[in-house]
Amino acid sequence: MKTFLLSCVVVLMSLFTAQAQYSTAVTSYLEIYDIESGEHRVVKEFPFLIEAPNWTPDGEWLVVNRGGKIYKIATDGSTDLIEINTGSIDQCNNDHVISVDGKWLSISSNEPGARSYSSYVYILPFEGGEPRRITPLGPSYLHGISPDGKNIAYCAFRGPNNEQDVYVMPIKGGKEVRLTDAPGLDDGPEYSPDGKHIWFNSVRTGRMQVWRMDKNGKNQTQMTFDEDMNSWFPHISPDGQKVVYIAYHDYEIDPGDHIANLNVQLRMIPATGGEPEVLVELFGGQGTINVNSWSPDSKQFAYVSYRLTEEMTAPAKKMNVQLYSLRTLLGTPTQFEQNHPYVLSRLVQMGYTGVEPASYEDGLFSGLTPTAFRALFDSYGLEIPSSHTTRPLTRAELASGDLTEALQWWDKCIAAHKEAGIPRLIMSYAPKIDNEAGLKVMAEYLNAIGEKCNAAGIRFGYHNHSVELDRVGRTTMLDYLITNTDPAKVFFQLDVYWTVMGGASPVEYMKKYAGRFEMIHIKDKYEIGQSGMVGFEPIFRNFRTAGVKAYVVEMEQASTPNILKGLRESALYLRNAEYVK
């Protein structure tokens, strides 16, 4: 049974390798990055999937795969895709390599007519022809041809346990030689230009890293030591000086996986080793840079980035996202500084038009001054309709009713939000209050904060969780605060998920307290609309009754560790829902 299960896993892995993204409609951008200028340009945009560019040794063509076939296109984008005849082999995957002299094209593909996704390595003239099979066994995934044109290097699944290791064998045919035997996956083998080394990636340390070994498999040496990324497919420049590779965030994927439609980086290290430089952050993964794509002069390399077609075609709507959802990526000033360029650009691509931060602390937002914080989001075209923060009353303050110190804290907070130009300030949390005397003080506190906010030209709101639905005598905390605060000073941001979790109906509250819910938090257990616990259609249809002016998507967690994927699916759900205007 164990062997059978492992075989099933291998078949699935082969599927992902050979047919990377075919189930998902994408727009592909064939791009070129210039090492000296740091600029990248789009060679051509395609309304379908292309993958894995090679750069021909004469510098004239880029070679890609599409739909099981191999194509070339001029490096300046002046031609359409031109098919390279691969004869009866019509299931080519994204593992294809051009010989150093440019005369031969080696490809990985299933056998003609086969649907088992058991890839083999073939070779044919670059100008086209009937391929000759090289590897006797599969799965075999090509990644390198030796500079002298005599050998190929590939990742193969072999043995009773389908161990995944690096192999080499003569192009003319002969015995394959296993070079690695470490536990886990070894993949992406590629010869150095001098033929002395083979670069590859290995998961043997528990994280996927770039390695280098002698061409005979000796002296296997780790070359990257990324602590928060999984590094794949090292590609050596023709001058032997630089290595570009693709790196996956560890929050997106397991170390041994390399799938499509994720948030990735293209990184570069010296061929002698050293600290990596991040060159490009993009949406891609499988298909982006599986094989060597360096220009002959070692000054440029090609890659493919992607956009999901559904992201581009779904109806555009005014839709905000709570940045607390992204606390694992943006939760500290350091994380925010490091990750915000990619994260914010992805949110825009998903269709979000605004954000609700939850990062105010001591006059700063995510470590930035209010002015700098606002300018940054303006640069991405993202509005900031509201902000979450809190200063709960202590037990002593609730008992005494002395609000002096607490209100002084809000003075500084309100001033920072006014400087940032944020029109609504929302108290995001307060501990459970289980007596009416405490509720009375809390209501006075909210009214006092609201009065200060009004003086600054800011609206003040309160955000509920489930504890506000617990009974307190003959009422609930939420009911008491709504009925005992001034609507001119305090609005409420109804969190529909926590309301349901508190045993109440969001729609009933929206009708009962018409006009009091200026904002709504749209939330589900995981991705929006998946649990069936929250009836979103009647909630949206009662926005006018409730007085809703804006809504905010929030995810406490996603169904997978990939919160960006969860936010993308949530955005698409709402953008495609006809009742969401």
Image (tube, rainbow, N blue to C red):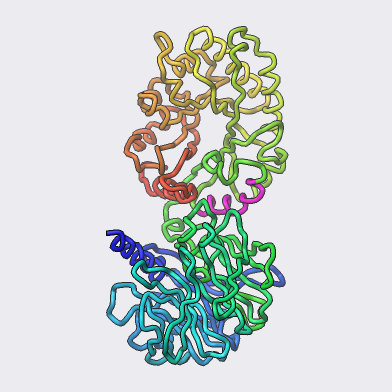
Q: Residue at x 49, y 18 (%)?
A: 432
Q: Residue at x 37, y 68 (%)?
A: 162
Q: Residue at x 49, y 66 (%)?
A: 182
Total marks shown come to 0
Q: Nearer the viewer, residue 457 or 263?
A: 263
Q: Position of residue 434 (x, y in %)?
A: 47, 12
- Tell me if residue 543 is in the magenta stretch: no
Q: Position of residue 21 (x, y in %)?
A: 40, 65
Q: Nearer the viewer, residue 306 or 146?
A: 146
Q: Quadrant of residue 417?
A: top right
45 relative to 382 in the view: left or right: left
Q: Quadrant of residue 444?
A: top right
In this view, 512 is above or below 41:
above
Name the quarter where the C terminus is drawn: top left
Q: Quadrant of residue 280?
A: bottom right
416 relative to 81 in the view: left or right: right
The range drawn in magenta is: 335-349
Q: Position of residue 572 (x, y in %)?
A: 42, 50
